[in-house]
Image (spheres, rainbow, N blue to C red):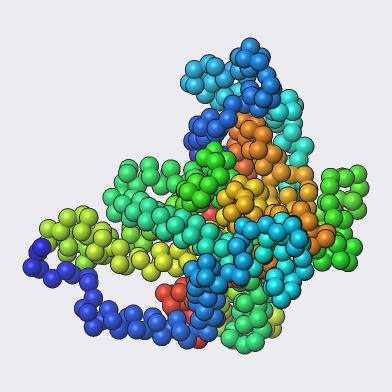
Amino acid sequence: MLAYVARRLLLAVPTLLAVMTLVFVLVRIVPGDPAQTILGDQASQEALMAMRERLGLNRPLWEQYIDFLRDALSGDWGNSMVTGHPILQEILNVLPYTIDLTVASLIIGALFGIPLGVWSALHRNRLVDYVTRVGSLLGLSFPAFVSAILLLLVFSIELNWFPVISAGDRSSVGEVLENLALPAINLGLIMTAYITRVTRSSMLNVLGEDYIRTAHAKGLPNRAVIWIHALRNALIPVVTVVGLYLGILIGNSVLTEIVFNRPGLGKLIVGALSQRDYTMLQGLMVIYTFIIIIVNLLTDLTYGLIDPRVKYS
Amino acid sequence: MSAVADPGLPAKTGRALLIAQALKAFRANKLSSVGVVIFLTVVVLALLAPIIAPHDPLEQNILHRMEDPSAEFWLGTDSYGRDILSRLLYGARISLFIGVAAIGSAMLIGSTIGLYAGYRGGKVDAVIMQAMDVLLAFPALILGLVIVAMLGPSIQNLIIAISLTAIPPFARIARAPTIVVKERDFVEACRALGFNDTRIMLLHVLPNILSEILVMGSLWLATAIRVEASLSFIGLGVKPPTATWGGMIREGFEKILDTPWLSVFPGLAILLVVFSLNLIGDGLRDVIDPKTRTD
């Protein structure tokens, strides 16, 4: 399995390289002069020239490209053009917030989505199935910022249960959880909707299989048949879908972070875009791609945990 | 034109029968009918906006700032005294136009790429799909954000950004069945009859994968409307004062403590349209894949 992981990571190198090239090109087509952005409208021509020199913007593109790749590989991602702080440091500072949010919403999604999906499948075409299906479809129709605003209105402003601004105090577990609760519920509800749907259809497929009939025939209790025999076989498509939707989750976390004014990668990228922070943008795009590659790998490795027949070769 | 009958094309009666069966299955799914009714209603309201909107969506009125819903302003007014209902109606035009244009072009370009890659196979296929995978490596919203920031916010650029994020999934969905269909006997027969590749792809492979592309189209139209609203909400959408749903929510969000309905009404409008499209997409998928059919 180690050999498999190593090979998968090696295979990710060309993708990462392609993405970095794309990012390099994209970032340089963005209109606006970063030197002007940093120094402001009143800057003199000499100051602008000096700043461009310092940022390496007046060197040939291919030289900038080689430098960009070399620095990125050696872990030197440069400094933010706006704050002057090292990019990697800024990203690592907010990364825990985004990871907390993503993992917490995944847990909420799995905790509610899987049982709901199973329940719905077991009561196919009955009222509960109908309600669950409409409810989950409604859940995944919510733009993340609309549901976030509704949650904020009800639970923070009307009921005063949670802080209006989920800002970044990480001093104690209690603080972290209090700040995390509403944003995680927001994304968790959307995730629940996705997981419920895929669990339901996957369970419906599995419940028709011969080995389920055999399990019933040999007198196993219904509960064991459903939660052990059927669910375990139904989980592989669920894991695939969860892996795929993590991309959507990461996108939605941008909106959630804005509404709840919570630090994270999303707020960082929106800030970098509006301030034309080229170097920050480059770093963030590479980090996003890296996260997606790792998630895809983890998804594939999870298959083996669920189904021992899966071989990594 | 060749006088030889095309193999693989169902006879007229057979095809009519298939469509009739599909329509019946679609209508049997009550939820998708509800989706169609909601969506068509929104489309009609959007088209009629200039006639039925009670006020000019851009007309500011200092005397009627942030008013609660009333007989004159059914959904209240915003901080410039503009009528929310009229802005919602006009906003629907923008959302629907951007969504349909973006997904229409993504469907056309993506399916062509997927069809071509799948049909040609080999190195062409490998290179094209690798490029698509690189684009797929970005979360759609992040890619959209960067492209709009790069091109500048305008209706045209939003359409380009959203359709660029949607091309890779359409290429994938078109490629997969193409690989299967091109090995079928009737395609072999077409080649033996001397039909050229374009004709085989358009007349024989495309009809076989069209249904899946259409299902995906309806679901992606929902995504496109959501992404457009999200970009406007972030501040990268169509510039104010043009009424857009995402932009209205953004403006309303700044006043959320005083006048929550400013962001709630456009939020519900987006939810309704996206929900109706998802209902339609779900119904269409059931028709195509009888395994998941509910009734």
* Residue positioned 48% across, 60% down in the render: B97
Say which of A155 and B93 sits in front: B93
* Residue positioned 54% across, 38% down in the render: B150
Residue B276, x across and y down, in percent: 55, 73
Q: Quadrant of the N terminus of chain B?
A: bottom left
The quarter of the picture where residue A211 lies is bottom right
Q: Most extreme residue toward the left, as rendered?
A: B3
Say which of A281 and B64 sits in front: B64
Q: Is residue B16 left or right of residue A88?
A: left
Relative height, residue A201 to residue A268 (above, below): below
Residue B49, x across and y down, in percent: 53, 68
In this rendering, does residue B3 appear at all?
yes
Q: Is residue A109 left or right of residue B179?
A: right
Number of dots carrying numbers: 0
Say which of B61 and A198 sits in front: B61
Relative height, residue B122 to residue A242 (above, below): above
Q: Is residue A261 left or right of residue B27?
A: right
Residue A92, x across and y down, in percent: 74, 36
* Residue positioned 78% across, 56% down in the render: B255
Residue A180, x across and y down, in percent: 81, 54
In this rendering, does residue A190 appear at all?
no
The quarter of the picture where residue A125 lies is bottom right
* Residue positioned 53% across, 84% down in the render: B30
Relative height, residue A303 to residue A86 (above, below): below
